[in-house]
Amino acid sequence: MAAFSSSKSTNQNKMETNQDKLAITQALEDLYLKGIYEGDIDLLREVYHPGTLLFGDIKGEPYAKTLIQYLDAVKNRVSVKDSGKLFRGIIHTIDVVNSIAVAKLHVKMYDFNYDEFLSFHKINGKWVIVNKMMTDIAQ
């Protein structure tokens, strides 16, 4: 027989979670979204853990890259900013549990509409992306 229990979060835990969500939001806006918009790999290196893997599909084709491969692609493409194409990044949700978190975003860039799931880990007091899952959706 399964046992069920519920416990209420303390105010301290709620405050820490809110501070963590704010820190992740700031990392997403100031480093991740700005980095992909401007094609700034230094900003992206700051938000990604060096061992990050990226997976998903683009227009139905499988996508799998190491962080090094991804940053090389960003460095060698025309940035969204310089392309003159529309860019919009929307943070839908951020869920935090202790030192891990998942953010769901929608990113419109070039001719793509991506739904993204970014896994974060808090390492040495800093939230960094440790995994990126993405899919190109029709809109």
Image (spheres, helix red, strand yellow):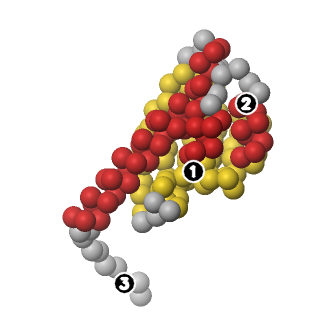
**Kind of residue at badge 1:** Ile
Ranked by sequence position, the earlier of labels 3 and 1 is: 3
Q: Is residue 76 above or below residue 97?
A: above
Most foreground residue, 13 or 39: 39
Q: Quick one: SS at disc 1?
A: strand
Q: Secondary structure at mark 2?
A: helix
User: Is any part of residue 100 visible from this angle?
Assistant: no
The 10 Å Cα crowd at callout 3, few under 14, some 14 to 19, many 20 or more, is few
Disc 1 vs disc 2: Cβ atoms closer than 8 Å?
Answer: no
Residue 31 appearing in the image: yes
Q: Residues within 10 Å of mark 2 (few under 14, many from 20)?
A: some
Residue 3: give its label: 3
Residue 75 numbered tag:
2
Q: Residue at x 42, y 41 (%)?
A: 26
- Label 1 to label 2, Cα distance in Å? 19 Å
The label nearer to you, 1 versus 2, is: 2
Image quadrant in which the C terminus is located = top right
The residue to which callout 1 is attached is: 129
In three-dimensional space, the C-alpha distance between marks 3 and 1, rounded to whole angstroms, equals 35 Å
> Which of the two discs, 1 and 2, labels the residue nearer the N terminus?
2
